[in-house]
Image: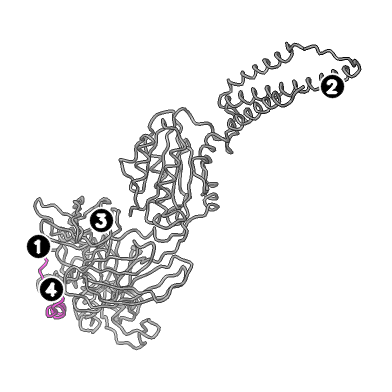
Amino acid sequence: MLFANPVFLFGLAALAIPVLIHLFNFRRYKKVWFTNVRFLQELQIETKKQSRLRQLLILLARLLAIAALVMAFARPYIPAPGGLRQSSAQQEVSIYIDNSFSMDAMATDGKLIEVARQRAAEIAEAYSASDRFRLLTNDFEGRHERFVSRDEFIRFATEVQVSPATRNMTEVIRRLNDLPAGSQGMDHDAYLLSDFQRNTGSLAEASPDTSSHWFLVPLAAEKRNNLFIDTVFFSSPVHQAGQPVTLNARIFNASAEALEKIPVKLTINGVQKALASFSVEAGGTASIALPFTENAPGTQYGLVEITDYPVVYDDRFYLAWEVLPSIPVLAIHENEPDPYLDALFSGDSAIRFSGVPVRRIDYGSLYSKALLVLEGPAELPSGLRQELKRYLNSGGTVAVFPPAAGKLQDYNEFLAEFNLPGFGPVDTVRQRIAGINAESDLYNDVFEKSGSGRVVLPENVDLPVVFRHYALGTGTQTRVEVLLRLRNDRPFLITSPAGKGRIYLFAVPLNDKWSLFPKHTIFVPTLYKIALLSNPSRPLYFPCGGDAAVEIPADTLSGDEIFKVRKQDSGYEIIPEIRKMGTAITLLPHGQVKEAGFYEVTQGAKAIAGLAFNFDRRESDLACYTQAELSRQISRLPVKDIRILKEKKTPLTREIRQIRQGTQLWQLFVALALVFIACEIALVRFFRA
């Protein structure tokens, strides 16, 4: 037991006063004459014994009453476990309120966010009015991250609402560590109020400041069931107007109950296009295929919906993509265009095909093309090589046919920029293409599939003959994919990412003296699919509150006009940061997009791109760490001054005061003093000698 005011213990010297009074008892005895002397002696002996006992009891009661009062003024207490010292004259307190979407779940006392606001106020009430308080939420708002009075903090806490911003606990603790202290020499307490989800609440990589006292306040939801759309994606990246396509939705059942016949709906541009239902096991995932036919060219806005309660923010999934009226393809040749490519693309309305001699290229027009085909010009000028590099870095696609005779060194230097293999010596041994990578994006829908869903080519399939070819390896680029392979196991066609774009590299020129590839039926789907896959595309969706880069067409930046991102059917709009790196134009919203939905990128009055934003799905799985799991994580941290405040029916104020100040005993001693005074009064009034 310790004392908050030990100087008052000198008051125990006052115990000598009643002792002295009782030692010098000045009470006068009254004489009473009585005839029977023997009876008087007996009465006198009995009265003296009772009087002595009564005086001793009164003395004891007075001593105990004075001692109890002195102890009460000395403020005795039992220190809290762990050795937490008494608070200084003034405290600094930081309180983090998790206001992510998962805090919208229901607890026994209401929504978790409401419970968190109440607990924050209780924590503040546990401190004195002179202490300073700071609020932190997932929004990392500057107006909160400063020390204020207790009343102002409580007002801030009551205004906290659920936000789409998602932070993991490591980020939160790092933010608290980095925030400046209010004054030097003050004790600092930090409280973390959260449901501690498994997706975001791990403390394994946290590094709490060792100079602060840390407290975890776990908040538990009554039910943690949720059904949500995790992601959506297309089966094929090719989008053409009037062509069938399949959108896949992956739905996760984060609950302990199996669900059956749940409807899911797909709406495109406000028109319902597909409807399906699904069943999913507890904790399982369901994949739903939603087939439909592409609309007319232009920006398409899709919405996938399910119905679930009470967590509903993740029941709608927005996506946006572009369907081009035609794909621009440019062939770069020496003097004359290749007849095979011209015959393949010229009569197709889905392809906008053109050709240009290598010496007459308008470099500025390259970036408006989806696909560049090098038809084996004898040399690649340094200016063209530089522009091709920038074109690939901006997301373009290049198909390279080597020259029959020319400067292979130009080609090899260009390919070396992306760690791709160059063209080696000519192999004049007659070969035949013997292998097709039917699982690749280029050929996965070209051949008929078996009942197992895989393509099995017959052993005697007719494939082109190759009379001579350049030796072509796979280089040091680990992402090189061999699409066509010769019988001698050398590659005939390879592909690899290059910058943000892609390169397709052939081992032979576009010449029937080198191979029969241009005359073979495999030539048509190969070049046609390369053109279709070259269609530039942005991500189908972006996360709300994030800083994902949004790329827009390179030819849209002109003059002093600014870009804006505007939410459809709403007056909300932002001006993002614009970065131009080479030919790439990137917009950075810097977390300003807070609401899920459809957005447009506008330049003046013109809409130049459509975007979709969705809330972060990390908050959708409501599984949380138990207190035992949090305790194990805390035990592994280098910081030992960290506690878990368990959920109780009583207010946190009492528990925090007990932790900070220990178990206070002065109330007990005040009560004992009153009891001893009452005993003294009773002895004086009712115990007569």
Tell me the distance, in whole angstroms, between the alpha carbons under discs 2 and 3: 103 Å
What residue would you read off at disc 2?
A: 46
Looking at the image, residue 143 lies above or below residue 565: above
> Camera-side residue: 609 or 490?
609
Tell me the distance, in whole angstroms, between the alpha carbons under discs 1 and 2: 131 Å
Q: Secondary structure at mark 4?
A: strand
Tell me the distance, in whole angstroms, between the alpha carbons under discs 2 and 4: 129 Å
Residue 622: x and y in percent read 44, 59
Residue 576: x and y in percent read 20, 51
- Residue segment shown in magenta: 339-362
Res 159 visible: yes
For image coordinates 66% across by 27% down, the residue present is 676
Question: Which label belongs to residue 362?
Answer: 1
Which corner quadrant holds the C terminus?
top right
Tell me the distance, in whole angstroms, between the alpha carbons under discs 1 and 3: 29 Å
For image coordinates 28% across by 53% down, the residue present is 547
- Amino acid type at circle 4 is Arg
- Amino acid type at circle 1 is Asp
- Amino acid type at circle 3 is Ala
Does residue 624 appear to the left or right of 554 in the view shown? right
What residue would you read off at disc 3?
A: 549
Res 473 visible: no
| Badge 2 or badge 3: first in the primary sequence | 2
Q: Nearer the viewer, mark 1 or mark 2?
A: 2
Q: Nearer the viewer, mark 2 or mark 3?
A: 2
Tell me the distance, in whole angstroms, between the alpha carbons under discs 1 and 4: 17 Å
